[in-house]
Image (cartoon, rainbow, N blue to C red):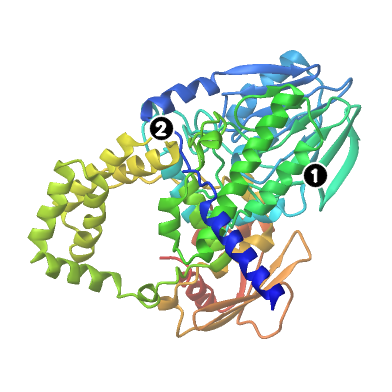
Amino acid sequence: MILIVRLIKLLVILQLFLSCSETTIVESTEPQTPEDLIAHSKEFRKELITVTDGVHVAVGYALANSILIEGEKTNIVIDTTGTEETAREVKALFDAINPNPVESIIYTHNHADHTYGATVFAEGSSPDIYAHSTTEIYLSRVIGILRPIISSRSNRMFGNALPKEQVENNGIGPFLEIGRDGRKPGLLYPTKTFTDQIEFEAAGHKIQLFHAPGETNDQLFVWLPEKKALFPGDNFYKTFPNLYTIRGTPYRDLVGWVNSIDMMRYLEPEYLVPSHTRPIVGKEKIKTLLTTYRDAIQFVHDQTVRLMNLGLDPNEIAEQLVLPKHLGDSPYLKEFYGTPAWSARNVFSGYLGWFDGNPSTLKPLPLKDEAEKMIQLSGDWDSLFKVAEDAFLTDDFQWSLQLTDYLLRSRPDDQKTKLLRQSALEGLGGQESNPNSRYYYLSSAAQLDENYQENDILLPSLEVIQKYPIESMMETLKVNVIPEKSLNKNIQLLFTFTDSPKSFSLFLRRGVLEVQPYMITGSSVQIKSSENDLKAILSGVKSLPISLVNGSLKVEGSRADLLSFFSSLRN
C-alpha cells in the first residue's frame, strides 16, 4: 500500500513537472519578396569556376551546371546541360582549359537539364556514360507515357510560356533552355549502370558513385577521394529543396533524402560542387551547411507526420508547418524552388495517399454540380461574378481566382470571367518570390489569351526517338487508347522488324491495349518495318499514310484493322 501511494505521488510530481516545462514559440523567418528573387539572380552570373586543381564548374550557362574533371590524357564530365546549344557553349569553355577527349560522362540523375547535352560532349570520342540502373526507365517515362502533361506543367513552372524578359531566374538556375529558341536535345542513354555503388578509374582518377535517392529515385553522388571533392547532384543546392515539384513527380522520400545527405556529410568533403548554384569550399562550412539542410528536410518530414497523427489534413498541415527561424534564415533554405507547405502535402500523400480523411471528400459532388450549388447560394451567376470581381478589386486575388473556378464550370466560354481569372493570376504572380509558383501563375494567365500558342518543350526530335527503346514506345501506346473509339473493337496486330529479331503482339480489346513482346498467332494484320521507322510513326514524326505509300511500313492482312487501330489512339 505504501509503495502504491509513493508511486501515485511520483506520477503527480512528474505530471506537474511536464505541465510546467518551458515551451518555446516557433518563430519563423521573414517572408520573401519579389525583390529577393531579383537579388537571387546574382547566384547565376555566368562563370567558369575553378574549384580546385583540375575541377571546374560552369555556372549560369544553363539551368543545370556542367562539371569538368581533368585528366592527363582524357577528361570526365558530370552532367551535360539541357540542349546541344548550351552544351556547345560550355564545351568550348572546357576545351579552352583542357581539350582532352571525354572518357566518361556521369549523369547524376535522369532530368533533362542534366542529360540532354550529352551528344556534344561525346563528339570525337565514345565515352562511357555512367548512371544509376533505373535512370533509363525514368528517361523513357518522361519522354513517353508522361510527356504531354509533364511538358505542359513544366512549361508553366519554368516560365517557358512567358517572354524571356519576364523570367528573372528559375531558382536553381538562370532559365530552362529546353524548349527555348528552337534548341535541340542531344540525349545519349547510359552505357554503364550500377545499383548501390560502383568504383572505377577514369582519366587517371579513382571515381566512386553512390546511389543517393533524394530529388529523384535514381539520384547519385560522385566522390573523388583523392581530392576530397563531392558532387551531390540535385540533393543539395542554394534554395529550399523541391521535396515536391509542382510540375509533377513520383513521391520524393524525405527520409531517404536525409540519409543520402548523411552519407555525404560523413565523408567530410572539403569541396562541394552542386549541379545547381555555386560551389562551396571549406570542410567546416560544408559540414555546417549539409547539416542545416538535412535538418530542414527531417523537420518537415517529422512535423508533418506528427500533425498527421494528430488528425490534421494536408491543407491544415501546410498552413501550420513553418521552418523555425534558425533553419529558415539560412541562405541555403530560402524558398526559391520548393516550399515546406508543398512538401508537407507530399509527405501526407506519400504515407496516406489521396484521401485526406474528411468524409465529405470521400465521394464529393461532381465539380459542375458543386459550382451550380455555389452559384445558387450566391443568388445567381451574376451575383457570384460580382463577388469575384470585388475580391479582385480589393487585391484578394486568391479568393477571386477560386471563385472563377465555379463561374467557368458553369459557363466555360464566358470571356469576362476568363479576363477576370487572367487578372487574378497576374496579381498572384506579381506578388510571388518563389519562381515556380510565380511563373505557374503568370503562365496560366498567358494561356488564357486567345492568341496563346502551346509549346511542347519535351517534343522529341527524330534523333532522340531513334535512341528511344521500342519497348518504351509500345508502353506509350497503352495510355493513348481512347475508350470512346475502341470499346466495340477487338483487333490483334503483329509487329516485326527488318533490323532486329524483336516482335510485338498487340491486342486492342474493348478499350484496353495488351502488348506482349513476342509473336502470338492469330493476328489479322502483320506490320513490318525498321524499328526507327515505326518509332517515328508512333510518335507522330512521320505520317502513317505516307509510310504505307512509300513502303517503309509493309502490311499484310487487313489494312482496315490497321487504320481502325490507329484511329483508336489519337483524338
Q: Amino acid at mark 2?
A: Gln
Apparent side of residue 459 relative to residue 417 in the rendered image (left or right): right
Q: Residue at x 19, y 58 (%)?
A: 413
- Neighbor class of circle 1 (other Cα within 10 Å; few <14, some 14-19, many 20+) is many
Q: Can residue 347 be seen in the rendering of this structure?
A: no
Question: In the figure, 364 relative to 421: above or below?
Answer: below
**Callout 1: SS:** strand
Q: Which mark is residue 32?
A: 2
Report x, y in % for residue 143: 58, 52
The numbered mark, 1 or 2, whose residue comes first in the sequence reads 2
Q: Residue at x 54, y 78 (%)?
A: 512
Q: Residue furthest front?
A: 2
Using the image as rendered, state which of residue 377 and residue 460 is in the foreground: 377
Q: Residue furthest top?
A: 96
Report x, y in % for residue 366: 30, 74
Question: In the figure, 226 relative to 486: above or below?
Answer: above
Where, quadrant-wise, is the C terminus in this rendering? bottom left
Among the 4 quarters of the image, the one containing residue 453: top left
Question: In the figure, 390 relative to 159: above or below?
Answer: below
Among the 4 quarters of the image, the one containing residue 449: top left
Q: Can residue 237 be seen in the rendering of this structure?
A: yes
Report x, y in % for residue 427: 26, 39
| Residue position for label 1 | 210
Apparent side of residue 417 relative to residue 188 in the rendered image (left or right): left
Report x, y in % for residue 181: 46, 32
Question: In the figure, 60 relative to 408: above or below?
Answer: above
Using the image as rendered, state which of residue 167 and residue 327 is in the foreground: 327
Q: Amino acid at mark 1?
A: Phe
**Callout 2: SS:** loop
Q: Residue at x 57, y 24 (%)?
A: 61
Using the image as rendered, state which of residue 209 and residue 542 is in the foreground: 209
